[in-house]
Image (cartoon, grey):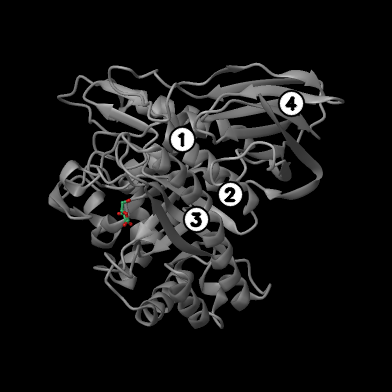
Amino acid sequence: MSETRVVVQADLPIGTISPRIYGQFAEHLGRCYYDGLWVGTSNTEIANTRGWRTDALQALKAMPVPLLRWPGGCYADHYHWRDGIGANRPVRLGMSCGLTVEDDNRLGTHEFLDYCKEIGAEPYLAGNMGSGTPQELCDWVEYCNTTLNTNLGKERKANGSDGPWNVKLWGVGNENWGCGGNYTAEQYALEYKRYSTMLRHVDSTAELVVCGLTDDWNRVIMHALKDHLDLVDHVSIHRYWSAGPAVDFSEEEYYKMISTSDETEPFLQSTAQIIEAVTRGRKKVGIALDEWGVWAPEAKHTCNYEQVSPLRDAIATAITFEVFHRQCNVLTLANLAQVANVLHAPVQTSGTDFWRTPTYHAFNLYAPHIGATALHTLVDGTSFCLPDGSAGVSATSSVSAVGDFTVSLINRHLDKTVQVRLTGAAGSSAAGRLLTAESPRAANSASTPNAVVPIDLDVTGDSASGWTCALPRHSIATVTVRR
Ligand code: AHR
């Protein structure tokens, strides 16, 4: 069996891994929010807590979900927040991504913020620029955050929330280059300045997210904001990828998914360079990768944007986390699309059935990194390679405030097991957890909810000679070294 060395460089910290980069996205799209998270209290046989399905609630608490974005997506630019407060809520067209449904607005601001509180997530609200007004968005911010006894503050109290929620993160539109209004970058930049100027007056501490796209678009908007850096805190970019069918992918497509996941990094780097070229240290403006994930060709609007999410997607997730950790000084938040049922979902449901996808388990395996300090991690990329010559093993590591190391490893190879020797992580004991299956096509489902679940990984050795473990083909592992 080949051996690969992984070296944790404890004296080379990168930065803090913000909880916000382990965020999720819940859009009113298909069965994500309604059905995936919410089933109501009447006429349902599904166990629920005040209407929230209990299985999803418990699973998301445990995953965990430090940040949750809502209500869209493309839905955000049709959403009028006043429809979702109070007792008499109108039935409107719920519109996103070509799906048009009746939306009775049962789930509005209070319900979403209640859910965030319940699962321990920071809320991130996406505002409506496409069909809204600056005043409408200002009013939403005031309704959520004012401590004053204004009419909106009183209305919030009358609707059941005494104290303000103090929502920090506000998106000013979503994909305004497309579904959010088909603006040009120049038009959007002008609109953004108007909206954000007004929002700043309402809440000077809100963190405002401008809609980005490609390097060209991002250059235009950053240039337009160069003398108004107080108006922007994060630049939103999205990244979806696919490589062949969700499950019946070829060997070539398996490896394509691996390399495509890695390509998230140059996109973050070029975005960071564009931001830095304008900010020049005058203001910290971060990158909000507020939609990311695998978008399989099967997930079309005709099938509610649902897809099977096999082990390969969990490996893609783990690769993306490695990128996130390396870029944690410029990436300020990220949201997987989407949290339930839709696209690259960590949890899926069908009637009373509920299961965690392998991606859920990837999030849970990497959770110990949250809030820790990312460390440079060297991998010997010559002894064990993929067919294209790139390294077969990749790794990320972090150290917690109390000095425990977490090292996460990926064996990207489709067919070969590899022995890993881990050095640089000093501690008294090490334990590991492993996620793998017979095939990267393996997935969980209603009838086989536990086909792909983490198991214990045997880790031997000590700090002096290094910790060793055998990583099976196409697997992810997390080794925790206790101080
Ligand atoms: O996540 C699904 C959709 O993808 C979102 O609504 C939109 O922002 C993006 O195009």
Judged from the image, the secondary structure of the residue bearing numbered disc 4 is strand
Q: Which residue is mark 3?
A: 168
| Badge 3 vs badge 2, beta-carbon distance below 8 Å | no
Q: Which residue is mark 2?
A: 323
Query: In the visual, does 357 lie left or right of 106?
Result: right
Q: Which residue is mark 4?
A: 481
Disc 1 to disc 2, C-alpha distance = 14 Å
Query: Mark 3 is on which residue type?
Result: Lys
Res 155 seen here: yes
Where does residue 144 sit, x and y in percent of width and height?
40, 54
Along the line of sight, which residue is nearer the eye, 243 or 398? 243
**Looking at the image, which residue is at 59% across and 44% down?**
322
Q: Which residue is mark 1?
A: 314
Disc 3 to disc 2, C-alpha distance = 25 Å
- For ligand 1, the image quadrant comes to bottom left
Query: Mark 4 is on which residue type?
Result: Val
- Mark 3 or 2: in front is 2
**Looking at the image, which residue is at 67% across and 74% down?**
282
Query: Mark 2 is on which residue type?
Result: Val
Which of the marked residues, 4 or 3, is nearer the chain's N terminus?
Answer: 3
- Mark 4 or 3: in front is 4
Disc 4 to disc 1, C-alpha distance = 23 Å
Neighbour class for label 4 at 10 Å: few (<14), some, many (≥20)? many
| Badge 4 vs badge 3, beta-carbon distance below 8 Å | no
Judged from the image, the secondary structure of the residue bearing numbered disc 2 is helix
Residue 215, relative to residue 438: is it above or below? below
